[in-house]
Image (cartoon, rainbow, N blue to C red):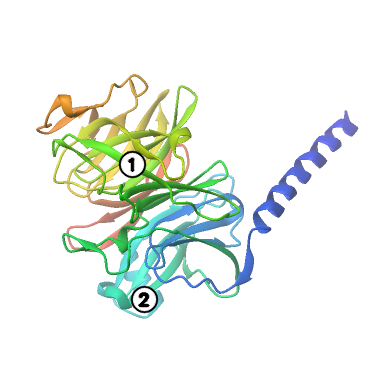
Amino acid sequence: MFTRTCALLAVVALSASAAHAGVQSGLQKGDPDVKSAGALAFGPDGVLFIGDSTSAAVFAVDTGDKSGPSAKAPVNVEGIDQKVAALLGTTAREVQINDLAVNPASGNVYLSVSRGRGPEALPVVVRVDAGGKLSEVSLKDVPFAKAELPNAPAPGAASRGESKRSQSITDLLYVDGKVFIAGLSNEEFESTLRSIPFPFSKADKGTGVKIYHGAHGRFETQSPVRTFTHYKIDGQPFLLAGYTCTPLVKFPVSDLKPGVQLQGVTVAELGNRNRPLDMFVYSKGGKDYILMANSSRGMMKVTTENLAAAPGLTDKDGRVADTAGLSYETIEGMKGVVQLDKLDDQKAVIIVQEESGRQDLKTVELP
């Protein structure tokens, strides 16, 4: 028995070592030339993916943050924007927190930040540990890799006064050895979903996606996915994507192929005049739900029941006046949430915009 146990432990150790070596083999030490820090996502072994829309590139950076307590500790920081500003030697008016990601290996929270405003803003990544201590994540002389998007919008391209280049990467997600990227391209179907194997290989043109937007009563190919998450339906992997104003759409991962134009299935309209900000799937009471933070319609807890069989909204359904498809409830106790990520199976980390304008970082129970 002792011999078999030792042999099993040796196999586990070798497997972990091989996985670590596989991740590290794709990284080279140096200074990642990050021009803007937007969407964040964590991969294996403390690797942080940073979406840089200005460069139209995704960076993988080894944070060195590979383990933590077995039970994830709550993280709470009142006035997180003010404390980030103090760390960077400026004022809260001169910082913008763009995204939040929890490192699943340690439970530490990472923030992508713009120091300053406009095109001259400097990219910064800040780590917040369980005790509330803030520190700047070094982007100098670190193991990293870079994947450049080949068909991003030109730097000067704009639509309705908003830079298309700034929307070349709107959200990121790491799942099963691949980094999924949402954003705009310069293709006929501007809205694009991509997947890049990690360690990085050359990024392809991605899949142009089309959806039926019931609130607008038309098909759309120019509006980008704002936030998305991964979910298995009948054992098959799907991306669930939230769009502005607010259709929820499912895409089978198997259909995301380079150069293909794909129509998603709109499974819900969650109300117009709204922008989804962040989302993830979690389980509660034996059922799965989508938790979605929104700019003007609060925190939504969306059911996944009937997600497999949902026929989808199409042009035959006409214009949707308010909501349709999957049902949801609004979580009244979670107002003003602008960022969120799952800490563990029971808790989430959120950033709340208070009425005073101050932003607080909080750990809350999943509803």
Q: Residue at x 55, y 44 (%)?
A: 71
Give the residue furthest to the bottom: 89
The image quarter in which residue 287 lies: top left
Residue 164 appearing in the image: yes
Which residue occupies the extreme right position in the image?
3
Q: Is residue 196 above or below residue 36?
A: above
Q: Amino acid at mark 1?
A: Val
Alpha carbons under labels 1 and 2: distance apart: 42 Å
Q: Is residue 323 left or right of residue 171?
A: left
- The structure residue drawn at horizontal position 18% and vertical position 46%, both measured from the top left corner, is 274
Q: Secondary structure at mark 2?
A: helix
Quick check: 235 left or right of 248? right
Residue lying furthest left: 321
Residue 205 at x, y percent in the picture: 44, 51
Residue 367: tell me if it is visible: no
Which one is nearer the viewer's eye here, 27 or 212? Answer: 212
Disc 1 or disc 2, which is closer to the eye?
1
Q: Residues within 10 Å of mark 1 (few under 14, many from 20)?
A: many
Relative to 86, residue 236 above or below: above
The reply to whether the C-beta atoms of the residues labelled 1 and 2 are less than 8 Å apart is no
Q: Which of 57 and 354 lies nearest the eye of the viewer?
A: 57
Quarter holding the C terminus? top left
Disc on res. 336: none
Q: Residue at x 31, y 63 (%)?
A: 166
Q: Secondary structure at mark 1?
A: strand
What residue is shown at x 27% (from left), y 26% (from top)? 312
Numbered tag placed on residue 86 in the rendering: 2
Indicate the position of residue 231 as horizontal and vertical percent values. Answer: 43, 33
Label 1 belongs to which residue?
Answer: 209
The picture places residue 38, in percent across and down from the top left corner, at 38, 61
Q: Amino acid at mark 2?
A: Ala
